[in-house]
Image (spheres, rainbow, N blue to C red):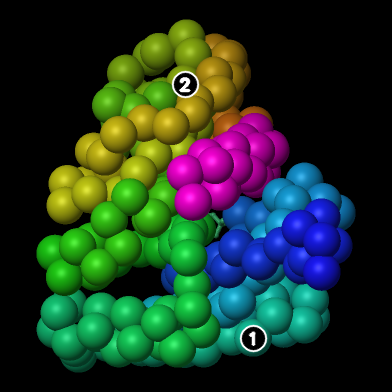
Amino acid sequence: MSPDLEAVRRARLGILISGRGSNMVALSDAVRDGGIPNAEIAIVISDQMDAAGLDKAKERGIETLVIERRGRKRAEHDREIIAALRAKNVDLVCLAGYMRMLSPEFIATYRGRILNIHPSLLPAFPGLEAQRQALEHRVSSTGCTVHFVDETLDGGPVIAQRAVPVWETDTVESLSARILTEEHKLYPETVSVVLRQVANKE
Ligand code: GRF
């Protein structure tokens, strides 16, 4: 078979969620519509049984798995997630509202292949309630960041950012909604760039 007729191996994404799953939906829509070319979503894993994102994934025909964190040590919980990702031959792990720090073993296993999206312009406002932090600091703009995940809380190398204005009349809800609209564009765009870079290196 000539090389151009050979099937290009599609990159396999594993998405970790804990809740609503709107970024997972944005990634999945981008895979479907070609915004993230040559990729497929191998699995969506939630650490919460009642995560709303699970139904959204199922509606899209994506395989889901719940690996509950409750009452389990991080290392043991993460080992189970790593096994599930390996079983699905996942190339790139995307955290999308996943609310637990990853163990050193998880980071070591997928180093350079774990992305996260955070609703601020890191390194400003890491951790919880980034939008509330932005309002409390009275900044005039904030935004969202896609970064590689390392052992630090929201501290890994930044890959891409998008700024969003903060209005005097903003509430946490209005600001979060404005940022989220940008998150849904930035995350798929960034995943597609990262996958292109990985493919070029192979
Ligand atoms: C998003 O704001 C994301 O930046 C943050 O958690 C939120 C998850 O939202 N890490 P969703 O579950 O993707 O709707």
Q: How crowded is mark 2: few (under 14 residues within 10 Å), some or many (20 or more)?
A: many
| Amino acid found under the numbered disc labelled 1 | Glu
Q: Residue at x 59, y 42 (%)?
A: 196
Q: How crowded is mark 1: few (under 14 residues within 10 Å), some or many (20 or more)?
A: some
Number of callouts in the render? 2
Judged by depth in the image, the label closer to the viewer, 2 or 1, is 1
Residue 118 point in image, percent of width and height: 43, 42
Q: Residue at x 47, y 9 (%)?
A: 140
Question: Residue 83's spot in the image, x, y percent?
Answer: 34, 87
Query: What segment carries the magenta color?
Result: 180-202
Q: Is residue 50 left or right of residue 111?
A: right
Q: Nearer the viewer, residue 193 or 96?
A: 193
Which residue is tagged 2?
Answer: 142
**Considering depth in this image, is 161 or 52 the residue closer to the camera?**
161
Callout 2: SS: strand
Q: Does the magenta stretch include residue 171?
A: no
Q: State the residue position of label 1.
A: 63
